[in-house]
Image (cartoon, rainbow, N blue to C red):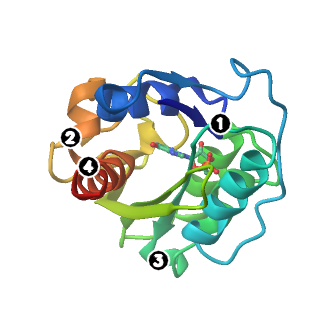
């Protein structure tokens, strides 16, 4: 069975392929499937937004569709940017989002934060499997590392003792929010 990812973010697609690659004969991005779909992600939770993505894409394909939604939740900002992580600085500009985060935390000593991910897998027959994952860490005062994307260079992950942008893909996947959400999803698929 093929799997369609409701995203064109190559970082995410590579991470998903690493974890679910042996469960599907082929994993395709939206652009690889020739699908254009960018619904407004106006849900209140990460799971709401993952469901918005998979339901919109599922109308355009007969493949199973996997969607994920991720956000960074900062304790000192009462959980912001949260579901607004992509548009924190008013657009989808990762560099501007990171700059705004550093600005908002400039005088803050409590740097605790976590990433949360919700994933949803919707089959053409209507079956739905969902899972969540979380990674805990701290927001640094400057960017460290050149791998990854989004907020990775500012997020020091407690479990691996470095930022996600310093980690290899394998190191990040083993402990990351999306890695854990996908692993939880894979475990549920094993039991189906
Ligand atoms: P979305 O899940 O693609 O909507 O992403 C929401 C926001 O979180 C965007 O600004 C992404 O760049 C960021 N983001 C998503 N996943 C990660 C990650 O694994 N590391 C760092 N930032 C991420």
Q: Is mark 2 within 8 Å of ligand 1?
A: no
**Does the residue at mark 3 contact the one at mark 1 (Cβ under 8 Å)?**
no
Horizontal side of 97 relative to 15 (left or right) equals right
Which numbered disc flags the more N-terminal residue, 2 or 4?
4
Callout in the foreground (3, 2):
2
Closer to us: 171 or 39: 39
Ligand 1 closer than 8 Å to the CB at disc 3? Answer: no
Q: Which mark is residue 76?
A: 3
Residue tagged by mark 2? 174
Front position among marks 3 and 1: 1
Residue visible at 28% across and 52% down in the picture: 180
Give the total number of marks visible in the rendering. Answer: 4
Q: Which mark is residue 157?
A: 4
Between residue 75 and residue 115, name the one nearer to us. Answer: 115
**The residue tagged with tag 3: helix, strand or loop?**
helix
Circle nearer the viewer, 4 or 3:
4
**Residue 75 numbered mark, or none:** none
Residue 95 visible in this rendered orientation of the protein: yes
Indicate which disc, 4 or 1, sits on the residue closer to the N terminus: 1
Name the residue rendered at 29%, 57% in the picture. Answer: 192
Determine the residue positioned at 42% across, 34% down: 16
Give x and y (percent) for residue 145.
Answer: 37, 26
Which percent across, then down, holds residue 162?
22, 39
């Amino acid at each position: 069975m093929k799997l369609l990812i409701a995203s064109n973010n190559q970082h995410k697609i590579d991470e998903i392929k690493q974890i679910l690659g042996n469960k599907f004969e082929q994993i395709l991005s939206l652009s690889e499937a020739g699908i254009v779909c960018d619904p407004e992600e106006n849900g209140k939770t990460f799971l709401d937004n993952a469901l918005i993505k998979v339901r919109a894409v599922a109308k355009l394909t007969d493949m199973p569709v996997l969607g994920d939604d991720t956000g960074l939740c900062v304790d000192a900002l009462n959980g912001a940017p949260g579901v607004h992580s992509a548009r924190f600085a008013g657009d989808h500009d990762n560099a501007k989002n990171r700059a705004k985060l550093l600005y908002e935390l400039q005088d803050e000593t409590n740097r605790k934060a976590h990433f949360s991910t919700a994933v949803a897998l919707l089959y053409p027959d209507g079956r739905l499997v969902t899972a969540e994952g979380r990674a805990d860490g701290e927001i640094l005062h400057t960017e460290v590392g050149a791998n990854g994307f989004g907020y990775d260079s500012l997020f020091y992950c407690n479990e691996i003792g470095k930022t996600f942008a310093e980690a290899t893909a394998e190191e990040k996947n083993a402990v990351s929010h999306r890695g854990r959400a996908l692993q939880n999803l894979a475990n549920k698929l094993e039991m189906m």
